[in-house]
Image: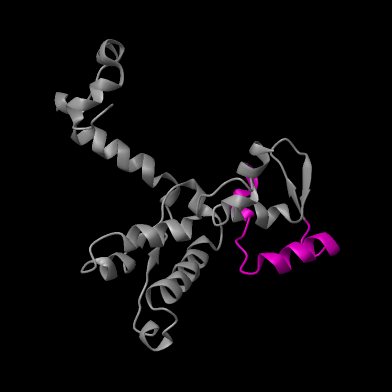
């Protein structure tokens, strides 16, 4: 199943009304689409097409015991936790990256949900102030590999700085305490 989802992930759209989509997928065949896998097998997907990426916004869908918040609420909480003087600038320059951001519709869904959270939690429903609120989510075309590329650039820049790296021998000798040389306190 994991291989199948990886293969068709670029075709899985985010939906704005998941309940309506779920109803359509269970009561009709409107949502069913066929995908041909690289080995020639054909897989038909209905509700799975939108439920798989929906987990990013509603983690409780895979396990009702999960108390974690979705990506939109996590983004909102992170920006709201920083200094009030610079929050507005952060809302105006959000960049999504990594393979999971390749789902069609993710940036617009993320924008819609963050705006809704801002309206309800920050502005307490004041739509007059909401008209001045600006959010911009960038979704660069090469975002699938941006995390790796950023790490590769950082590694290249820091390659000659021994204090930035730890060796296998250091880890085997000190365990997690070797992180202390990087300024990370380990208990």
Residue 28 included in the magenta stretch of the image: yes
Q: Measuring 38% from the left and 73% from the top, which residue is drawn there?
A: 122
Residue 65, by quadrant, is top right
- Pinpoint residue 99: horizontal percent, then vertical percent: 49, 46
Image quarter hosting the N terminus: top right
Q: How many marks?
A: 0
Image quarter of the C terminus = top left
Report if residue 159 is visible in the image: no
Residue at the limit of the structure toward the bottom, as seen here:
128
Location of residue 85 by image quarter: bottom left
Q: Quadrant of residue 37?
A: top right
Q: Where is residue 13 in the image (x, y as percent from the top left)?
A: 62, 60
Q: Is residue 154 magenta?
A: no
Q: Which colour scheme is used?
A: one colour
Mark yes or no: residue 116 visible. yes
Q: In this view, does 172 lie to the left or right of 107?
A: left
Q: Percent x, y for residue 136? A: 37, 69
Residue that appears at 26% across and 39% down:
153
Instruction: Give percent across and percent down for residue 124.
Output: 42, 78
Q: Is residue 11 above or below residue 126?
A: above
Residue sitting at x 38%, y 46%: 146
* 187 vs 22, nearest the viewer: 187
Q: Nearer the viewer, residue 2 or 182?
A: 182
Q: In this view, does 175 lie to the left or right of 165?
A: right
Q: Is residue 5 left or right of residue 133?
A: right
Q: What segment carries the magenta color? A: 7-32
- The residue sitting at 60% across, 51% down in the picture is 60
Viewer-nearest residue: 149 or 14? 14
């Amino acid at each position: 199943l994991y291989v199948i989802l990886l293969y068709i992930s670029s075709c899985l759209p985010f939906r704005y009304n998941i309940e309506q989509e779920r109803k359509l997928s269970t009561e009709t065949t409107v949502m069913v689409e066929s995908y041909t896998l690289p080995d020639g097998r054909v897989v038909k997907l209905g509700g799975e097409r939108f439920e798989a990426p929906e987990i990013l916004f509603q983690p409780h869908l895979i396990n009702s015991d999960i108390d974690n918040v979705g990506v939109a609420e996590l983004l909102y909480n992170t920006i709201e936790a920083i200094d009030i003087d610079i929050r507005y600038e952060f809302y105006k320059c959000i960049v999504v990256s990594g393979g999971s951001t390749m789902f069609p519709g993710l940036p617009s869904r993320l924008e819609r949900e963050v705006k809704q959270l801002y309206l309800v939690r920050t502005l307490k429903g004041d739509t007059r102030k909401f008209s001045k609120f600006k959010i911009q989510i960038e979704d660069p075309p090469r975002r699938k590999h941006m995390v790796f590329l950023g790490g590769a650039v950082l590694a290249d820049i820091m390659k000659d700085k021994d204090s930035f790296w730890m060796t296998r021998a250091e880890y085997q000798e000190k365990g997690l305490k070797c992180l202390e040389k990087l300024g990370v306190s380990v208990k």
